[in-house]
Amino acid sequence: MSGVNKNIVILISGSGSNMAAIVETARTQRWQARFGARVAAVLSNKAAAQGLAWAREQGIETAALDHTAYASREAFDAALMVEIDRHDPALVVLAGFMRILTPGFVAHYEGRLVNIHPSLLPAFAGLKTHQRAIEMGCRFAGATVHRVTSELDHGEILAQAVVPVLPGDTPELLAARVLTQEHVIYPRAVERLLGAA
Ligand code: GAR
């Protein structure tokens, strides 16, 4: 990660609670003063994503690009890359961004692209992770922060958090327990990357 100004661009599709945790940690841990880092923009493929409104209230630049308005995955990713690159990002942080990315997009941000996935990878890549963990009788579940490669939910593991699966758990209960830990490990992992640069 080079340069004095390390811009972080965060991509979301929904509530954006991981994004909010990162924005708040950036403030409380003084990322600007310590690393020259700031969350420059929050982008979404859904204009109605709750997290966008929250980010705007924080004074962060936001933009929404509706993926259904593009003829192909490649066309959407190309437009998204233009929007992201306006901020010359040192890090692109996927935080509940529910889109499969094209190899061209992943290659463009190689070394700068991270994601959080709600399972203990390499177990349960893909969707419905909590339901699958409960159905398999797992005693533990969790979340993984990882670098993004063109293979879905693979790439170097940067951080993990483990929570118990409790008797009577539903996917919703387990998801909420995992999410509280996501809010701990994701900001920390991003901070470590900023510090290592
Ligand atoms: C989080 O649990 C995140 O791990 C998951 O979506 C949720 C987003 O919540 N991501 C994925 O499933 C990616 N495949 P948030 O919008 O409140 O951060």
Image: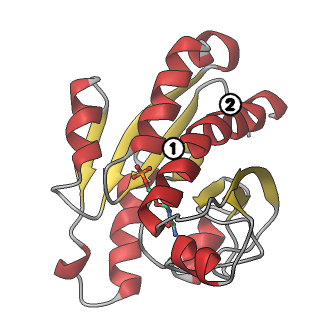
The answer to whether 191 is drawn above or below residue 63 in the figure is above
Report the colour scheme: secondary structure
Answer with mark 2 or mark 1, whichever residue precedes in sequence.
2
Q: Which mark is residue 50?
A: none
Q: Residue 182 vs residue 160: left or right?
A: left
Secondary structure state at the residue bearing disc 2: loop
Position of residue 66 relative to residue 173, above or below, is: below
**Left or right, residue 15 beside residue 147:** left
Q: Residue at x 60, y 57 (%)?
A: 116
Given residues 87 and 189, the one toward you in this image is 189
**Circle 1 sits on which residue?**
88
150 lies above or below 31: below
Along the viewing direction, whichever of 30 and 164 lies nearer the viewer: 164
Q: Is residue 90 something one can see in this rendering?
A: no
Question: Which amino acid is tagged 1?
Answer: Asp
Residue receiving disc 2:
3
Amino acid type shown at disc 2: Gly
Q: Residues within 10 Å of mark 1 (few under 14, many from 20)?
A: some
| Residues at marks 2 and 1 touching, judged by CB atoms closer than 8 Å | yes
In the depicted structure, whether residue 108 falls above or below residue 73: above
> What is the x, y in percent for residue 46?
23, 62
Residue 110 is situated, as x and y percent measured from the top left of the image, at 69, 63
In percent of width and height, residue 156 lies at: 82, 63
> Which quarter of the picture shows residue 17?
top left
Circle 1 sits in a helix, a strand or a loop, which is it? loop
Quadrant housing residue 60: top left
Q: Residue furthest front?
A: 167
